[in-house]
Image (cartoon, rainbow, N blue to C red):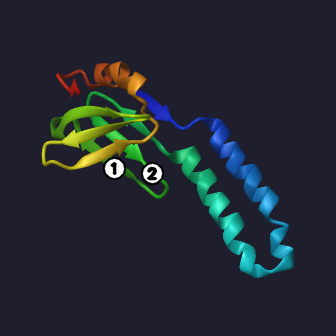
Amino acid sequence: MISFRQPPALAIAGLLATLGAIPLLVGSLFFIVVPLATALFAIWAWRAGTDASAAGLRVHALLGSHDIAWSRVDTLVPAQRKVIATLTDGAQVTLTAVRPEDLPKLIAASGSQITAQ
């Protein structure tokens, strides 16, 4: 199994921004949005990513994860700084934290005949 994750610096930056935004609450509770947004960003940066194994893909997001069997994956498409999995039903799923240069590792983890465009 191989895991692709966001750089840890993103989660640390989100945590520092959350701590820096807490003093805004002294002025008014109206500013609660700022530390909440930065805390959600820090949690997303910590959790978000893609795991690949011979069984399939697991794409992690802020509040949950989504499993995709390799049999449902038609092609893997590099698009600028991300990779998109095109499924057999025509749906497209962005593989979080997977970059185009990671495609050979991702295909090797599949253990199957997945193609990249």
Is residue 79 or residue 1 the one in the foreground?
79
Query: Badge 1 is on which residue?
Result: 66
Q: Which residue is drawn at 76% across and 50% down?
A: 16
Q: Percent from the top left, x then y, of residue 76?
A: 26, 32
Q: Percent from the top left, x then y, of residue 85?
A: 27, 39
Specify few, some or many for label 2: CA neighbours under 10 Å numbering under 14, 14-19, or 20 or more.
Answer: some
Specify few, some or many for label 1: CA neighbours under 10 Å numbering under 14, 14-19, or 20 or more.
Answer: few
Q: Which residue is drawn at 15% across and 48% down?
A: 90
Q: Answer with left or right where residue 56 lies relative to residue 37.
A: left
Is the residue 43 above or below the residue 10 in the image? below
Q: Residue at x 23, y 27 (%)?
A: 117
Q: Which residue is drawn at 46% across and 37% down?
A: 97
- Does the residue at mark 2 contact the one at mark 1 (Cβ under 8 Å)? yes
**Dividing the picture into quarters, in which one does residue 55 lie?**
top left
Query: Badge 2 is on which residue?
Result: 61
Q: Percent from the top left, x then y, of residue 74?
A: 16, 35
Among the two numbered marks 2 and 1 on one chain, the one whose residue lies closer to the N terminus: 2
